[in-house]
Amino acid sequence: MPRTSRYTTGARIETHFLDLLESIYQSYYAPIENKNTLIVSAINQTDLLKYLLQIAWENKLIKDTGYADISLKVGEVGRMLGGWKNNVTAKLAREKQNPSVH
């Protein structure tokens, strides 16, 4: 892979990592009504990040051990975001059933 492509791929991965952190931060502080949309955005960014990491690994830009480590961690973040989304969805459903109780 040409040197410029390597730097471009690395820069995109770094940008998506930062975007993911920003989405998680925004989700955390958002009102409950807006959390699901922001969490779904963070999940989508996680999926895109996994894809870019796989491309980097397939093009030998990341060593096997480095790819294994980071893909496990990114996968864990995705699972945590999925659990958070399910929790928020359940909470919204409970509030909808019992609007007087918060």
Image (spheres, rainbow, N blue to C red):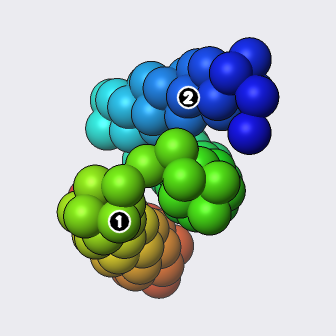
Residue, disc 1? 64
Residue 1 found in image quarter:
top right
Mark 1 or mark 2: whose residue is earlier in sequence? 2
Residue, disc 2? 10
The amino acid type, in three-letter code, at marker 1 is Asp
Res 3 visible: yes
Res 36 visible: no
- Element type at marker 1? helix
Residue 83 found in image quarter:
bottom left
Report the side of 40 relative to 90 (left or right).
right
Residue found at the far front of this picture: 2
Residue 72 found in image quarter:
bottom left
Q: Which mark is residue 96?
A: none
Residue found 28% across the figure and 55% down from its top: 66
Residue found 62% across the figure and 20% down from its top: 7
Q: Are marks 1 and 2 in contact (CB under 8 Å)?
A: no
- Residue 55 position, x and y percent, is 66, 56
Q: Residues within 10 Å of mark 1 (few under 14, many from 20)?
A: few
The amino acid type, in three-letter code, at marker 2 is Gly
Report the side of 86 relative to 2 (left or right).
left
